[in-house]
Image: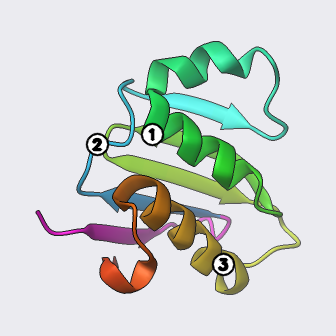
Amino acid sequence: MNRLIRVESHPNSRVRDFHINRVVSQSVIEHFMRPLRDSSESYLTKVGDPGAEVVRSLMRLPGVTEIFIKPYEIGVHISEVHDWDSLEPSVLRVLCTKVFGTDPDDVQIEHK
């Protein structure tokens, strides 16, 4: 199976969706905000191990404020003082390593 991430920009420049051709969540949709709280653990369990690890890793990135996760999609919101030029490579690195087990050089990345 090809490894593909399609990056979709939004009219709101603080948001990007990352569409992935592998299942990353077992839940229909879950929403997480920074900081992750103890109560987030039950929702992390719903998304499954790979999805939970993606959420935890993305939330460790400076500037990530919210995450929406669906079976084949992750929406990432960033703060006003951060920009996608500096954050997107880190987000893609997390997705590639946690979802595909490889680095971004081995994944087809398309911008929509």
| Three-letter code, disc 1 | Pro
Dividing the picture into quarters, in which one does residue 91 lie? bottom right
Instruction: Identify the image quadrant of the N terminus.
Output: bottom left
Q: What is the secondary structure assignment of the residue under circle 2? A: loop
Residue plotted at (35% across, 60% down): 100
Amino acid beneath label 3 = Trp
Badge 3, how many Cα within 10 Å: few under 14, some, many 20+? some
Residue 45 shown left or right of residue 100 in the figure: right
Magenta-drawn segment: 1-14
Say above or below: 16 vs 28. Answer: below
Residue that mark 1 sits on: 50
Mark 3 or mark 2: which comes first in sequence? 2
Question: Tag on residue 41?
Answer: none
Kindly state the secondary structure of the residue where label 3 is placed: helix
Q: Could you say whether the residue bearing mark 1 is in a helix, strand or loop? A: helix
Disc 2 vs disc 1: which is toward the camera? 1
Q: Residue 57 at x, y = what percent?
A: 66, 51
Whether 43 is drawn above or below 22: the answer is above
Q: Is residue 11 visible?
A: no
Check contact, mark 3 vs mark 1: CB within 8 A: no
Q: Earlier in the sequence, mark 3 or mark 1?
A: 1
Q: Are marks 2 and 1 in contact (CB under 8 Å)?
A: yes
Tell me the distance, in whole angstroms, between the alpha carbons under discs 2 and 1.
9 Å
Using residue 67 as the reference point, say whether residue 9 is left or right of it.
Answer: left
What is the C-alpha distance between the residues marked 3 and 1? 24 Å
Residue marked by disc 2: 23
User: Which mark is on residue 84?
Assistant: 3
Identity of the residue drawn at 33% across and 68% down: 5
Q: How far apart are the alpha carbons under marks 3 and 2?
A: 24 Å
